Image: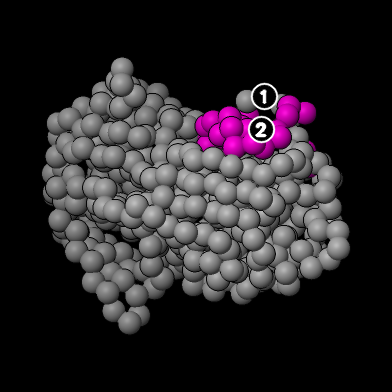
Amino acid sequence: MNDGGLIARPGGPLRGDVRAPGDKSISHRSLILGAMANGVSEVEGLLESADVLHTAQAMRAFGASITRTSTGGWHIEGRGALIEPADIIDCGNAGTGVRLIMGAAAGFSLAATFTGDQSLRGRPMMRVLTPLGQMGASWICREGGRLPLTLRGGSLSGVSYRLPQPSAQVKSAILLAGLNAAGETEVFEPEHTRDHTERMLRAFGAEVRVVDSSSGRAIRLVGGQTLSGARISVPGDPSSAAFPLVAALITPGSEVTVRDVLLNPLRTGLFDTLLQMGADLTFSNVRESGAEQIGDVTARHGPLEGVIAPPERAASMIDEYPILAVAAAFARGQTVMRGIGELRVKESDRIAGMARSLRDSGVMVEEEPEGMVVTGASHTNHGVRGGASVQTHGDHRIAMSNLILGLAAIEPVSVDEAEMIGTSFPGFHELMTGLGADLLGA
């Protein structure tokens, strides 16, 4: 991929059959749990993105042997415990990685210092540090719980913690710390969040209990459990599959199939919303793979209608709102997205970033403190104008979303940088151009 910017130009239909990169959430967890386990773990389909590779390097620093095999798999030899790293842990841009690793490290008697790139150093960590502190961990950090941060773990006690806002990262950090805490650890979530940690803990031999009630879900585990090596097959990431699929939905004459996509119901909020909009989206070859459901997803171009995306669906699609906003730009009427304030503290302020870039492409957007309302242009005679020169502020999803818009707009759309797309979607440029997209270096 060009190390500078990229330009997306409108062209012909997109057609083809591709596989999305491995799921980022599952990839992070497989490396962390494999490093904590006793014995050997084998991982197939790992997402080899910059974020995930930073997590692999971090877990090596905590004592695990992690190597890529000649066949493209990953071989992990865990020690059953993490050791104190000899140097600072650089997590790059990986917010999921650093939060989960802090939870895992907190359960052991060690001190570890974490840092990251400029974006990650600006992201708040207190929502993870607060429950870890209640369990007995301590830390020294910059104001607001920001990196660089030194965490000291060990001698933890179980906690009963109610998530103040939906966050699978916070839940997972607490559960990973609870593995080595005295007594029982419970996380209560009023709204369900992605459950990959619970599923994968069971795959590594842990006992995790989940109790549903009318008020939410409680996840409980008893400390002192030992993990054993496991075999993990990482399915395709629905957050990455969203880009070629939405591109097909908005580009006339297109038909694209993405194979082996994760269809965990706590991750399919975007697909549910697109179907609600009338998208021609079909699912086939649906099956179980390991502890997860996967299948093939086909998108065909067709008309879309604006909808109100239910706020309670946000946890299942929080990373997909930028690309949903692009689909909304091509829909008839208004699409309302609320309850998404978390987007303001991602790699960038994604609400502000998408509102600004869509307006620059001629789309009407009303920005709200915790949401936005996009008025689609498909009912006009002119469609989406495009023509924006997008400042991405280093955010990979802002970059990819606007490039997808440019493929179906009237005028080309450019983004100021594209190298960081590799943090989540290595091969994005090659996959999209293989489908027929016109993407050129700026």
Disc 2 + disc 1, Cβ < 8 Å: yes
405 lies above or below 213? above
Q: How far is mark 2 from mark 1, CA to CA?
A: 6 Å
Indicate the secondary structure of the residue bearing disc 1: loop
- As rendered, which of 39 and 203 lies closer to the eye? 203
User: At 18% across and 44% down in the image, what residue appears?
Assistant: 204
Give residue 58's quadrant in the image.
top left
Seen from the viewer's position, the closer of residues 171 and 273 is 273
Query: Which quadrant, please, contains the N terminus?
Result: top right
Q: Residue furthest bottom?
A: 214
Q: Tell me the residue that label 2 is attached to.
A: 418
Quadrant location, the C terminus: top right
Q: Residue furthest front?
A: 253
Decide whether residue 434 is among the magenta residues. Answer: yes
* Tag 1: amino acid: Asp
Residue visible at 27% across and 74% down?
A: 212
Residue in the picture at 33% in, 41% down: 234
Q: Does 260 sit left or right of 183 as displayed?
A: right
Residue that mark 1 sits on: 3
Tell me how the rendering is colored. Answer: one colour
- Where residue 167 sits, quadrant-wise, is bottom left
Residue type at mark 2 is Ala
